[in-house]
Amino acid sequence: MLLLFVAQGCGIYNFTGGNPGLAKTFQVDFFQNNAPIIEPGLDRQFTLALQDVIQSQTNLDLVTASADLVYAGEIVDYRITPNSATSNQTAALNRLTIAVNVRFTNNVEDDKDFERRFSFFFDFPATTQVDAIEQTAFEEIFDRLTQDIFNASLADW
């Protein structure tokens, strides 16, 4: 009896911290790559990664139109820059940075709408070609970006 009372008092809870409120559906529009450097396939990979995070951390249904929650935006930056130097004044580490601009629309609770830029990076040895670390870098960057977007839109922590 006590367990039932405690469970009712807490309401609906999940361990991801996601709180979609009264929303039942979500859509993720295609995040077009508008960065100065175009990396083929980056836009598709990011769009799918964001869909996967929301599906895995909520019970929302993915739809293609008229959703309660809408994620739209574009990839606005993809760049590789030297991050640290050696004593010979050459780069020891390079940094791959990806940034996305996100427009979140909550059609159930208008006060939760936002437009915000999110970015993250991956450092790698300057002696390594980008092609060799690309998949690992994308996974790490996408994990962070999508979780940050999820937290900004649905987490009440």
Image (cartoon, rainbow, N blue to C red):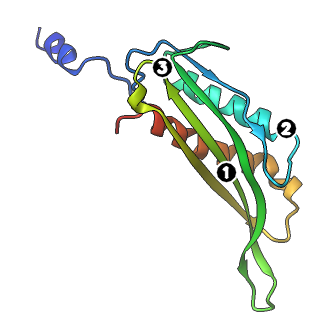
Q: Which mark is residue 99?
A: 1
Residue under label 3, please give it: 107
Q: Which mark is residue 41?
A: 2
Mark in the foreground, 2 or 1: 1
Q: Position of residue 100 (x, y in %)?
A: 66, 46
Q: Secondary structure at mark 2?
A: loop
Q: Residue at x 54, y 39 (%)?
A: 149
Between 63 and 49, the one nearer to me in the picture: 63
Q: Secondary structure at mark 3?
A: loop
Q: Residues within 10 Å of mark 1 (few under 14, many from 20)?
A: some
Q: Residues within 10 Å of mark 2 (few under 14, many from 20)?
A: few
Q: Position of residue 83 (x, y in %)?
A: 70, 73
Mark in the foreground, 1 or 3: 3
Q: Residue at x 66, y 43 (%)?
A: 142
127 relative to 67, above or below: below
13 relative to 147, above or below: above
The span from disc 2 to disc 1 (Cα, nearest Å) is 15 Å
